[in-house]
Every structure is written in structure tokens, then in C-alpha cells.
Amino acid sequence: MSIVTAPDHVSRQLAGTPKAVLVDLLYQMLRGRRFEEKCAEMYALQKIGGFCHLYIGQEAVAIGAMSTLRPDDAILTSYREHVHAIVKGCDPGRVMAELFGRRDGLSKGKGGSMHLFDREKGMLGGHAIVGGHIPLATGVAFANKYLQRDSVAVCFFGEAAVNIGAFHESMNMAALWKLPCIYIVENNRYGMGTAIERASAIYDVAQRACAYDMASETVDGMDVLAVREVVGRAVDLARRESAPTLIEARCYRFMGHSMSDPVHGHYRTKEEVEEQKQQDPIRSYFQRLAAAGTVDQKGLEELDRKARAEVEQAIQFAEASPEPAADDLYTDVYAQPYGPFKTREQ
Amino acid sequence: MAVMTYRDALNQALREELRRDARVFLMGEEVGVYQGAYKVSKGLLQEFGEKRVIDTPITEEGFAGVGVGAAMMGLRPIIEMMTWNFSLLAMDQIINGAAKMRYMSGGQFTMPIVVRGPGGAAHQLAAQHSQSIESWYAHVPGLKVVAPATAYDAKGLLKSAIRDDDPVIFFEGETLYGSKGEVPDEEYLIPIGVTDIKREGSDVTIVAWSKMVTVALKAADMLAADGISCEVVDPRTLRPLDDAPILNSVRKTNRCVILEEGWPFAGIGAQIAYQIQQQAFGDLDAPVTRVTGADVPMPYAKNLEHMAMPTPSRLVAAVREVLYLD
């Protein structure tokens, strides 16, 4: 098995990609990181409730992958999706307002951290049943083909989702019907606290594509340019030939599974987490850009300031947004309200 | 007006809506080449082609989810479950997906999907193929649940379901497919959420839907011979429930028996009884009574199966009970 990783691609990507794009990738990762750090802070202050899953450490996957998409392409994700939403073009203020449970949130405060939707931006959700959205993404790809559009659907999910029936059913249909869908497994090694070796009979997740005669690639998910290259190929294949690809992006989450899980918990050691942090996708990407003379330390600091300012603005927007009105409770259940069933207790 | 089977009425509805709107497609197991496990989709593949009449692998969760995803993109999928029993594999997609998409996206996504197929027991199909699970779906806000009893209702309601912008769970009666009824030659729609009086009467209200309407009408005939006049009320749609005609009937007769093929515990009948006691308590001359399927998995043996099913004679006994005749 070959894993696409540095330095295979570094020189050709650096040479072949416009500087503005290279810098934007760095900015997107910084902004994602700062956004999530702020979420942790807001969660501690109880501004954010419920379950909250942070993306810190995995930024290269979403950002590399989505840098290959057009605005009319759709993404569907699991519940660790704040950064995906922002990268897809959702307003960070409205994302934060959603996490705060406010009326100006993307889903009017009715979805929360795990259900971020923005129809216009092609953000087709945040879904919180592991693997449950994989058939949905397949259906989005089906619709694109049905409507004779060359838009693609990209589905992000964790490695734990590949043991779910819905994954296999979707892979089979996508390959059988030749659907323009890209399935990206963000293999961060742990489904909550269960290591992949303890959950999957096959270690190399991408091999699962063989069972469905589907194209597949494995990529270093800590390397934004490698992800960009591999996903770019899959997007081309989907657009040109309406064929699906399964991509395994090997990455690592630096934080706990959710806010209630400490950074390493019982299932991984502190040493392991610290060692992985040495592969920080933002730092290593910056070092490459610096070596190539694309961005220097001062440039990095400037980008970081801008990212922090944007996140601060998002917080201010969320703080200023009102809570949903009582009337909102019963709206958006049906197309036309029909008077929901109410018991006397309500 | 033509007389046709319930099956052909459904087939006409599908055909007319597939012709009318290119966004509509039919997907499911054996809907195409095989012409439908129950022949409801007969001839549709020939007329509309493989793009719009799509045979699937046996993969209920998968193709239900494909329908939900396609509906998010503005298509109008009709997903056929070969029987509703198999929908249990697809409940995550139907409940966590279809029913909640509009709400959890703050109203951004419309979900114009119909999931349809036969429900209820047929003849000696045993536990896994004989169940009426409409109450499971009717429990869920965001879904509409329809269960027509006649060819006329089946056609008009299916056409409305396909045009509806919300997910509609459409229960066909497995043993009703061959039943015949009058269906107008011209196009018509029956709105979702409108209760129908299937037989007028003055002594007792019987509430029944789907196949149980047939049982209720038989029992009403038997009781008429004894001079007892039954009003048979068919909600046709179980969610949203149009309860006004049920309540009006009860206010007239002062007695009510609810007939339900499914299990008694937390059934639709329990819900209807709640609404009657809450809103027409003072009009009741007897407690509301239910006749339901037995509270057991469906047995195979013919005699046991018969005992487990609501029958006209059991209904007659219940009606006589609320009239204090026995």
C-alpha cells in the first residue's frame, strides 16, 4: 500500500499552486484552530452546551480537501464539523451563534454544535448518528447525476463509521451506480476511546474499497498539501467520470473525543498525544512555506492576528444574537404548520 | 367512473405523478424489472426508464438514505419498502434523517419524500412479516402518516403525498391490493389530514383505518341486522389526525370503539381514546373501548393467527359491550 505523503508532492504542489492559495490554506488552518480553541473556552464558560467535539489536530484534512471544491459542491459531515462549516463558506459568526443556541445561528439555534447546515453554501449538515449521513451523501451524489450536474458530494466521517452497515450499503450503491461521491475517512485512530485496532478487522481502512471495486487512496492527513492532491484527483474522477473514491486520511485529534473527555483519557497515553503534537499540521505546513520563502514568521503572525480577530468578531456576533423566541419551538417541523399535538401539560 | 383494484389505483397515482413532475422517481427492491413485488409498479419501468424507476440492492437503510439525500437536493423520491417490516432497517434514515431535517436545519431543507409499501398481516406470514407499525411512525413529529382503506382513497392520497413537501409514510394494506372500488376517470386529489365517514350511523362510532375499515363495515352490517346503527369513521391520515369528525361523531353517538390491527400498548387507538376523553368526556355514555391485534408476535398457525387478528365478531362484541347489551 502506498501512502501519499511528503515529500512526494511537496515540491510539485508548492511549485504548481498559486501563492495566494498556499497562504490561504495556512490561514484557514489557523482560523480553524483559533475557532476551536475559542469554543473550548466558551464551553468552559457554559456559553456552549451539549456535546461539543473539537477538530484541533485534524485541520489539514478538511482544509486540504475543501480547497479542491467549487461552491456548488456539497459536503456532509459527522458531528465534529465546526471547521468544515466555516471552510465551506459559512459565516463564523453564525456558526458560533448556533453553538450558543441563538436565533441567528445557521439553524436558528435548533441544531447546535452537531447540526450545522447552510444550504446556500453547500453545507448539508452536521449529522450525529455515526455513519448515518453516508447514505445521505450518496443520495446527494445521486441527485447531482439525476439532474445532470457535474457537482460532487463529499462525505466526511471518522474511521469508526466504516464498521456501520450504512457505510457498506453506500459504498456498494455508489460503485454500482457510479455516483460522483467522495468518501473521506478521517482516521484519527480512535472511535471515541476505542482504538482502530480494537474495532476493525482491517487496519488499512482504504482497503475496504476493494470489496466494492472502488478507487481508493490513503493519505497523510496531517499534511494539507497531500490531502489537497489526493482529494483533487478524486474530485476530478467524480466530475469527469462520475465515479466515487474512498480516501483514508490518517490524522490525529489533539483534544479529547468531546468536552467531557480529557485530552488522553484511559485509552491513549499522554506521551502518545505529545508525540503526535510534534506533527502539528499547521506548524509543519508553515515550516515548509517558510523554507520555500512563501511566508515568513512575520507573515504567520499577521495571519494569526487576522484569524483571532475574525474569531473574536464571531463571538461578538453570537453574544449579540437573541435566544430563539418561544414561537420558534413549533416552527420548521412541517412545511405548513398544522397545529402540533399538545397535551394539557404543555 | 371505473371500478379498479386498490393496486391499480396506486399504479395510476404513481404513473400520473411520474408523468407530471420529472423530479419524481421511484426507488426500491424489485420495483422495475420484476414489476413490483406486489405489482404496484407494473409497467412503470417500461414507460419511464431506468433513470426514474430504480431497482436497488436489498439495502433498505442505504436506499432510504439515498432518498433523503436526494430530497435535500430538491428531488421528490418515492421509496418503496417491499413491506413495512423491512423499514425497521431504515428507521434511522427515516426518523433521524427525513423527519428531523427541516427542524434541525432551522427550516432550510424541505423533505418531499414518500416512503410507501404494504403493512399489516397477510395470511400465515408469521411474526417478522405480519405487523402494523403505523403507531411507531405516527409517534414522530416531522412525519405524516397515511393509511388508506379504499382504491379511491389510495389513489387520491398517494398523489397528494407525492406532491407534499413533508416526508409522508404511506401504509398500503397488503391484503387490500386486490380489493376493488370506484375511481373517477378524471384527476383528483384527496388532501392529507382529512377524516372520512365511511358509513353513517347513530348508535356507536367505530374508528378504523386501512384494512380494518373492511372489518368495521362487515361488523356494521352484522349489527344492523340487530337494529344497531354504527357510524364508521376512517381518519385515513393518522398524523396529522383530523379529530374533529371523530369527536363530532362521538358527540352524536355517545359511544366509541376503536379498531386497530396493531398491538394495543401505546397504539394509535390509545391516542385517539385520549383525545376523545379529553375533548368529549361529557358526551360519553360508556368508556371508549379498543379492539386490537393480540399483544403477541404474530403466530404462524392458522387458528392462532385468526385469534390474534381483530375480526368482525370481536368488534360486534365490543360494540354490544359499549351499548351495555350483554
Image: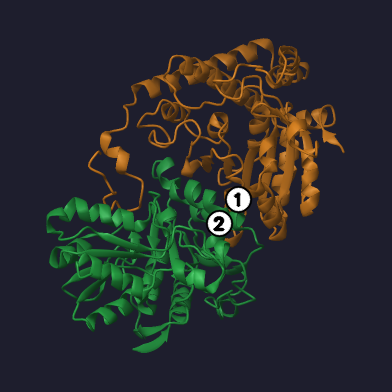
Q: Which residue is mark 2?
A: B64
In the image: residue A272, left or right of residue B277: right
Disc 2, SS: helix
Viewer-proximal residue among B88 and B229: B229
Q: Measuring from the top left, give residue A239's x and y in whole percent.
A: 68, 52
Q: Measuring from the top left, give residue A175's x and y in whole percent.
A: 72, 56
In the image: residue A88, left or right of residue A166: left
Viewer-proximal residue among B4 and B205: B205
Disc 1, SS: helix
- Chain depicted in orange: A
What tint does the image give chain B?
Answer: green
Q: Amino acid at mark 2?
A: Ala
Viewer-proximal residue among A221 and A134: A134
Assess whether mark 1 and mark 2 are in contact (beta carbons under 8 angstroms). yes
Viewer-proximal residue among A13 and A316: A316
Q: Measuring from the top left, give residue B170's x and y in whole percent.
A: 44, 64
In the image: residue A260, left or right of residue A18: left
**For residue B128, what is the image quadrant?**
bottom right
Compared to residue B207, the image places residue B42 above or below, namely: below
Chain label for disc 2 = B
Circle on res. A135: 1
Q: Amino acid at mark 1?
A: Pro
